[in-house]
Image (cartoon, helix red, strand yellow):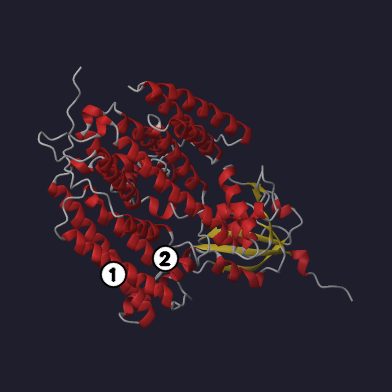
Amino acid sequence: MSKPPKPALVTARSARRLPRVPLLLLCAAYLLPGLFGRDPWRNADLAAFGQMVAIAQGRTDWLAPTLGGMPADSALLPHWLGAVFIAAGSPWMAPELAARLPFVALLALTLALVWYTTFHLARTEAAQPVPFAFGGEAQPVDYARAIADGAVLALMATLGLLQLGHETTPELAQLCAISLLLYGLAAAPSQTWRARLAAAAALPLLAGSGAPAIALAAGLAGAAVCRASRYAQVRAFATWVLGGTVAAVALAWWLGTWRWRVTAWSGDAGAGIARQWLWFLWPSLPMALWTLWRWRRQLSFRHLSVPLVVAGAGSLANLAMAGNDRALMLSLPGWAVLAAFALPTLKRGTSAAIDWFSMCFFSLCAITIWVIYTSMQTGLPAQPAINVGRLAPGFVQPFSALELLLALAGTAAWIWLVRWRTGRHREALWKSLVLPAGGVALCWLLLMTLWLPLLDYWRSPRPFVARLTPHVPAGACIAAPGLAMATVAALEHFGRWRVDASPDAAAGPCNVLLRVARGRPLPSPPAGWQQVAEVKRPTDRAEVTLVYERATARAPQRP
């Protein structure tokens, strides 16, 4: 049986690897901004942090954690990880920083796993480029390194990973676990024991991090791919994948992490999911689709079937959950690996279009960030500062020389990168992804330096708690039935109050009651309570938090 023709033609000059120092600096510019000097932000990031702090401080049980007396997220392993670092760093390290450290390490490990996954897949015979009649083609190892560099750049350039990848949420542990599974499947032919350990550990870690259904689906799909392999050792590897799947199911059963999260689609859900995929998976998805088209005769080979396991598992979970972006994030390693194999087949016009779009888009974003920052600092131009004052009343922009220097250094590096790319540097395979990855890193760096105080004021719960403090006594017990878990976490950590968020909390012993209302007229006080304040978040005009006190709590004392 003849082998299908390959679409890749790569010269030895094109297969040079990306220099390690620039690559490491780019990864540092992507990983480190936002690590220091900010609070956990609202919603999932804050709720996860509140659970970690509660575990670390002994306010809740490790196996059955709660927030405000209510069962919290069942993804225990990531919360344990954050709690251990908080406890180990106390009291000399702020809990916000201590909790963030292991999750930055998980993101860095994900990048490394994607690199090694792609390296192993690109070294397979089916993934190698066509040899030239008179020599001069890329050497297998050099080609694999260049493709692996492109996969890391594709993952960093993906817009959907930017914010979610810098949070302290269980999904980041899930992302690292599924990347470990991807590495195990890719390394099965050459690194037998490392691959076995990776597969055996990845699926239980994925289940223990809150994604048992995805672990089950990815494990079964991975085992099927292994059984269909042309390598005998890979076919035997299916037993280890199935063993990891069984362990994942058993662990999820023991921890009680099985949850029915399938959501019915609404009328316009399909259009919304299409828009979500377009921006969330850019630029990995278009390049991955091009890979699948150009390599369509090799779809059964490992360099395509293995990343399709992960890309398909996360994408199908997103569809089953009616567009859940955190489920879609788990598909990113697979899409990034597939995107890298598009690089040897891209035409010069397509590569130039990616470069020009990236250069214009990210340069415009950087200019916008700088203009608004300059306006907040100097008042010139005046309108951006007026708009900020209208959207974030009470905010005062501080000045930090260190943050300004870092932003200037990042901008200078971007200008140099644009000049380098627009010069005569057409050989390297990874060239088309340098500007997308560099632009994402630049904008993240600028946001986490020049705009960090504004974003922290906008998304941190600290200003809201400060407005609430004059109306709630220190150390008070707050009844907060129905309040979001992120708000409960903010009250417990930043306000140091005891919170009861159970449905019947108003009938309990707490003397302060909080209720959230949107719009007018405001609801009447419950029986036995009297309203003492209306508190709004500085950056939310619609939501009002009503503060009640028991009517008997202010009864005058008899002489």
Lower sequence index among marks 2 and 1: 1
Residue 332 lies in quadrant: top left
Judge by depth and name the residue closer to the eye, 286 or 137.
137
Task: Say left or right for 518 vs 113.
Answer: right
247 vs 16: above or below: above
Judge by depth and name the residue closer to the eye, 472 or 287.
287
Q: Of discs 2 and 1, which sits in the foreground?
A: 1
Residue 87 lies in quadrant: bottom right
Judge by depth and name the residue closer to the eye, 113 or 319.
113
Task: Say left or right for 444 vs 293.
Answer: right
Q: Which quadrant is home to the C terminus?
A: bottom right
For residue 448, the mark is 2
Residue 118 drawn at (x, y percent):
33, 40
Please tell me whether mark 2 sits on a helix, a strand or a loop: loop
Please tell me whether mark 1 sits on a helix, a strand or a loop: helix
401 vs 411: above or below: below
Query: Which residue appears farthest toward the front when viewing the image?
Result: 135
Residue 464 drawn at (x, y percent):
56, 67
For residue 330, the mark is none
Residue 162 drawn at (x, y percent):
39, 54
Amino acid carrying mark 2 in the image? Met
Q: Is residue 305 visible?
A: yes
Amino acid carrying mark 1 in the image? Ala
Residue picked out by circle 1: 412
- Please tell me which residue is depicted at 35% across the width and 82% down the height of the picture: 379
284 vs 400: above or below: above
